Amino acid sequence: MIRFEQVGKAYPGGIAALAELTFDIGAGEMVILSGHSGAGKSTLLKLIPAIERPTQGTVIVNGQNVSTLKRAAVPFLRRNIGMVFQDQKLLHDRSVFDNVMLPLSIAGVALRDAGRRVRAALDKVGLLEREKVMPVALSGGEQQRLAIARAVVARPAILIADEPTAHLDDDTGRDIVATFRAFNQVGVTVLVATHHDALFTPFMTRRLILSRGRLAA
């Protein structure tokens, strides 16, 4: 499903964010990515949907070599990847419903079918009754669940998330973890970068630990 082969990522000025990463993540796994701040977790996640490109090595996602993927093919790659980043990029001038509808509109899904899928995604994260409100009216945990609903509405095979429980209280954090677990149970491959390892430990299949851009364990 996801394969990194001797992957490195360096930024201008010779700053090495990642080096010599080699690992595989199989279909249906729930993998936790941990490590100190600045270890390279966010950079690693961004390589999967081609937000960033590796400086060296090969990134394979769903059989596609993301390292050499043409720019025009990137949107098609991302249709199979749900993304939840720390900057949620919610559209604050649109309702909860319209925020989740956006990926389906871009993909050209028929309006009637799209509406059913949006409401199913909102129901899955417990926001169906709030579909008409604006994001500003939601709590921090609800905004995170909204970002998750938007990430999964297109029924991706892979779901990646960067610190999805950051700045949330323990109860809300457990709710978010349960949401990821529910998607994993229906076959979605989940990769989560987090400092809150303990919340995910009962459900993960494996943990990858980064240290200074390298795979430590």
Image: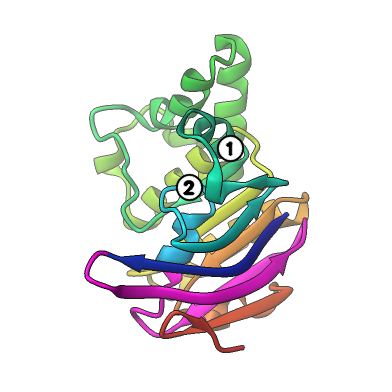
Which is more toward the observer, 112 or 27?
Answer: 27
User: Which secondary structure lies at badge 1?
Assistant: helix
Q: CA distance from mark 2 to mark 1?
A: 8 Å
Provide the residue designation for mark 1: 77
Q: Check if mark 2's residue and mark 1's residue have beta carbons within 8 Å.
A: yes
Q: Quadrant where the C terminus lies? A: bottom right
Q: Does the magenta run of residues contain 24?
A: yes
Q: Is residue 172 visible?
A: no
In this picture, residue 61 sits left or right of residue 57: right
Which is more toward the observer, 116 or 31?
Answer: 31
- The magenta stretch spans which residues? 12-41
The x and y percentages for residue 123 are 58, 38
The x and y percentages for residue 122 are 54, 37
Q: Quadrant of residue 166?
A: bottom left
The residue type indicated by label 1 comes to Leu
Local crowd size for mark 2, using a 10 Å CA cut-off: few (<14), some (14–19), many (≥20):
many
Q: Is residue 177 visible?
A: yes
The residue type indicated by label 2 comes to Ala
The x and y percentages for residue 75 are 51, 31
In this picture, residue 169 sits left or right of residue 126: left
Q: Is residue 79 above or below residue 9?
A: above
Q: Does the magenta run of residues contain 26?
A: yes
In this picture, residue 95 sits left or right of residue 150: left
Provide the residue designation for mark 2: 50
* Mark number, residue 66: none
